[in-house]
Amino acid sequence: MVKSPVGFSCLDGQGYYVSVILEFAIGGDEFALGRALGGHGERRVELERIIPVDESLIPFFWVEAGDQSKLRASVEESSYIENLSRVDLVGEYALYRVAWTGETGHLLDGIRVHDATILEGHASDRWQFRLRFLRSGQVGQFHNYCSEFDIPIEVERVYPLTEDALQGRTFDLTPEQREAMLLALDAGYFEIPRSVTLEELAADLGISQQAASERLRRATVTVVENAVLT
């Protein structure tokens, strides 16, 4: 079931509109790209950007490098995307480009139609999105679109993009530190007793156990310093 975002005023103190951020989650099989990337729950996938070109979408996304035969087979079977091509290879990740077939009623088409910008879009099994809208009304319109096409997004947070909100959200973490913290939190690393070991987290991150420990330590220090000392 789609959860409705909370409405609020998006005017700053001087009467200017500010951008609105929407964060939500959705199952990997609940939208076109997720289905087209079927079988990749064991690998991290991250969207780079979505570019509208003549009413079409050309998404670029990163996938952990390795045997990409499953990826190509899934794309070939999909009725939503075609023309998969690898653009670049950087370290352990490969950048891919695909073209949409023109099908409507899917999540990414709704993002384009409502002029949203994808700030984050990543998954291993469940997808997490962070979108920016120029007006608060567009958030409600996007929510209605998802309801109309039975796209079961789970809204997690809606907030205006102010300096305070941005600082409170990022805490000056690097992307790698934030990824490690989110993974540790989701996997139950901070629970008592722990649901996952540091060795398992390191394996999921694709780094050594020592590197994972240092990344989590630095991230924790950064969050505490920003939360307590500012």
Image (cartoon, rainbow, N blue to C red):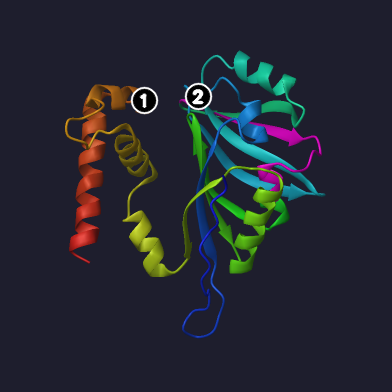
**Quarter holding residue 108:** top right
Residue at 60% from the left image edge and 30% from the top image edge: 29
**Of pointers 2 and 1, the one earlier in the residue sequence:** 2
Q: Position of residue 76 (x, y in %)?
A: 73, 20
Q: Is residue 204 left or right of residue 58?
A: left
Residue 101 to residue 148: above or below: above
Q: Where is residue 171 in the image (x, y as percent from the top left)?
A: 31, 56
| Element on which disc 1 rests | helix
Q: Position of residue 179 (x, y in %)?
A: 37, 39
Residue 97 belongs to the span the image colors magenta: yes
Q: Residue 149 carries which label?
A: none
Which residue lies under the disc numbered 2? 41
Residue 178 to residue 82: above or below: below
Q: Is residue 90 left or right of residue 206?
A: right
Residue at 68% from the left image edge and 16% from the top image edge: 73
Cα separation, mark 2 vs mark 1, equals: 12 Å
- Mark 2: which amino acid? Gly
Report the front residue among 39 and 153. 153
Which residue lies under the disc numbered 1? 204
Residue 166 belongs to the span the image colors magenta: no
Number of other residues with Cα within 10 Å of mark 2, as a class: few under 14, some 14 to 19, many 20 or more? some
Residue at 26% from the left image edge and 38% from the top image edge: 215
Q: Where is residue 152 in the image (x, y as percent from the top left)?
A: 59, 42
The part of the chain drawn in magenta is: 92-110
Report the front residue among 125 and 224. 125
Of badges 2 and 1, nearer the viewer stands 2
- Mark 1: which amino acid? Asp
| Element on which disc 2 rests | loop
Q: Is residue 92 left or right of residue 82?
A: left
